[in-house]
Image (tube, rainbow, N blue to C red):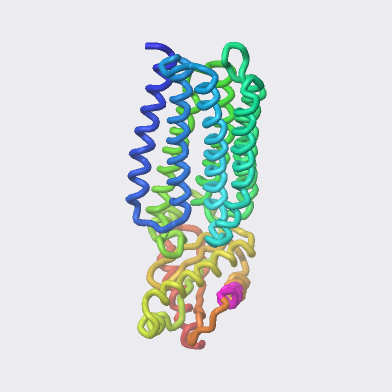
Amino acid sequence: MSVFGFYVEVNAGCILILMLLLYSIKRLPTPQIKYELFQKLVLWHIVYFLSDSAWALVNDAALPKNTFTVLAVNYFNAIIMPIVAYNCFMFAEISTRPEMTRKQIETFQFKLRIPIVVQTVTLLISFAIAPGFWLDDQLEPVDFYYFILSFLPLIYWVAGTVRGLLRTRTMLNRANLGTYLIVASYTPGVLVAGGAQIFFALTTPIFCFWCTAIILFAYLHMQNQLIATDALTMLNNRNRLHDYLHQPREKKDSFVIMVDVDHFKQINDTYGHAEGDRALVIVSQSLKKACERLGYSMFLCRYGGDEFLMIAQTDAPDDVIKEVRECLREEVSMQGESRSYKIEVSMGFARWDGNPESFRERMIIADKRMYEDKRLA
């Protein structure tokens, strides 16, 4: 077997793995746009591996090797590679910016596709008009081709990494850390793998190995997040709360804060469960916003039904409550629609010493104070 035959076989194996992964993703019962973008990311990696396999077959002369076929396979690689990088960037961006709306995402996507369209048209014209500029006497691409192949993808990959790392300063909980690390590790891995493949071992699919490995790692991480995430509000759920309570930590005083949506049953009974779900999403968004504004360590989860739980490392729980109410007012006003009911919350808190054994008792006290707040409202 030729070295290029081995190259194609490895690519075929990676394609099979990613196709099985794609089938698994499509069966996930989640409407999150992050998973839609991840599907596209996996699909475009498959397309690139197919294109790369065609490149290997032409170089091995298993397919006719002439000016047209060499230019064709290199053209498709140079176009598909930035599309792969663009999808990596979009996945990284949405994974670290859950507040973006679909309209904002679509506008963002349109702008970021413009360089790809320009490169696609420019390369097609130049390959047709001046094929000799791109190939040497042995029908091998010139160095400038490899610069074009890597330049635009490099911009997308580096931008995604830098933007993701900058957001680690405002992440809401430790569950997001894995996403940031995945985003951060993809680019240096691609640079090392792609560079090694181009300059040291052109016949070994190092790039294919790396991309498949990091995609599998990202998928496993997303599955773990799905288990620990409430599907409606995208907050932590009680599974994640259990993990959080048993993490090693400093014995530092915190406050357990219980949050309950006022008159939630009435909203459900009068306006329907879809409207009730909408109210829960609005409250969850206001809680996220409050966590970001306050800036100190905070754990946030949907405890069940219309109850939410916050664990704040602060000496001023009243400030947290005040900020939550302010953010809720802002979030409701931003909806821009009149409704015949109010979205308000009741809250109560209790000091917690960080010991998992005492947490339930502290939560019960916070819950009682929350219901006292509800009666006074």
Which quadrant: the N terminus? top left
Q: Residue at horizontal 41%, vertical 58%?
A: 31
Q: Quadrant of residue 278?
A: bottom left
Residue extending furthest front? 129
Q: Name the dominant secondary structure of the magenta segment.
A: helix
Q: State the extent of the magenta-drawn residues as a range.
A: 327-335
Q: In the displayed structure, would residue 298 be above or below residue 19? A: below
Please determine whether, in this image, residue 249 is positioned above or below residue 270.
above
* Residue 326 appears anywhere in the view: yes
Whether residue 318 is visible: no
Q: Nearer the viewer, residue 24 or 296?
A: 24
Residue 218 higher or lower than 327, as above or below: above
Counting from the top left corner in percent of width and height, residue 143 is at 65, 21
Report x, y in % for residue 30.
38, 57
Please say whether residue 16 is one of the residues in the magenta stretch. no
Foreground pick, 367 / 262: 262
Quadrant of the image occupied by residue 103: bottom right
Instruction: Please give the name of the residue rendered at 55% of the width and 29% of the height, measured from the top-left corner.
Output: 75
Q: Is residue 253 left or right of residue 303?
A: right
